[in-house]
Image (cartoon, rainbow, N blue to C red):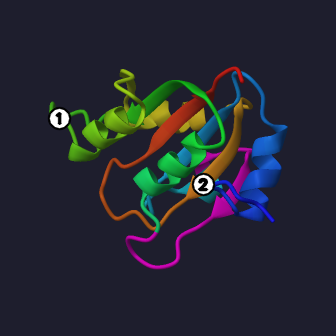
Amino acid sequence: MLTGNCIHPELMRVLSLLGHGDKILIADGNYPLASKTGDAEKVWLGLKPGIPTTTAVLETLLSVINIEKAEVMDPGDGTEPEIFGEFTKLLGGMDLGRLGRFEFYDVCGEKTLRLAISTGEKRTFANILVTVGCA
């Protein structure tokens, strides 16, 4: 029986295959996961609107993997979504790289994206792309 924070069998299977430099997308419920994540393994976790949140998924993944880099989708209008502060706090103050919407989509379509997770998150711009670090 697993005793860690992540007990989802499909997530654990895919996470066990990842290495340094591979990327994981944790997407809000609005993200076009099927069409914008290329060949990445896809896991749909959304149970109902708002559950689970992207921050809950990020917090769970942090109990299993090291993260060396994080990027978010910049709204492009000079505002900063509140969730960016939550991401930064969970990541111990790590600076978030900012990508424009279409640049974010392009990066998430590259071969280095190995896992794409859809959540029930309702907040906009609540997508985060993380790069797996060394053990």
Of residues 102 and 9, the one nearer the viewer is 9
The residue to which callout 2 is attached is 117
Q: Residue at x 30, y 42 (%)?
A: 86
Asked if 54 appears above or below 130 in the picture, the reply is: below
The verdict on residue 100 being magenta is: no
Of residues 127 and 4, the one nearer the viewer is 4
Residue 109 visible in rendering = no
Q: Earlier in the sequence, mark 1 or mark 2?
A: 1
Most extreme residue toward the bottom, as rendered? 48
Asked if 84 appears above or below 8 in the picture, the reply is: above
Q: Amino acid at mark 1?
A: Asp
Q: Amino acid at mark 2?
A: Ile
**Tag 1, which secondary structure?**
loop
Q: Is 18 on the left-hand or right-hand side of 122?
A: right
Residue 4 pos. (x, y %): 67, 54
- Which quarter of the rendered picture does the C terminus lie within? top right
Q: Residue at x 55, y 33 (%)?
A: 130
Q: Is disc 1 in contact with disc 2, using a CB cutoff of under 8 Å? A: no
The residue to which callout 1 is attached is 77
Asked if 61 appears above or below 35 in the picture, the reply is: above
Q: Quadrant of residue 133?
A: top right
The verdict on residue 47 being magenta is: yes
Residue 98 visible in rendering = yes
Residue 37 pos. (x, y %): 64, 46
Q: Residue at x 53, y 56 (%)?
A: 32
- Which quarter of the rendered picture does the N terminus lie within? bottom right
- Provide the residue span drawn in magenta: 36-51
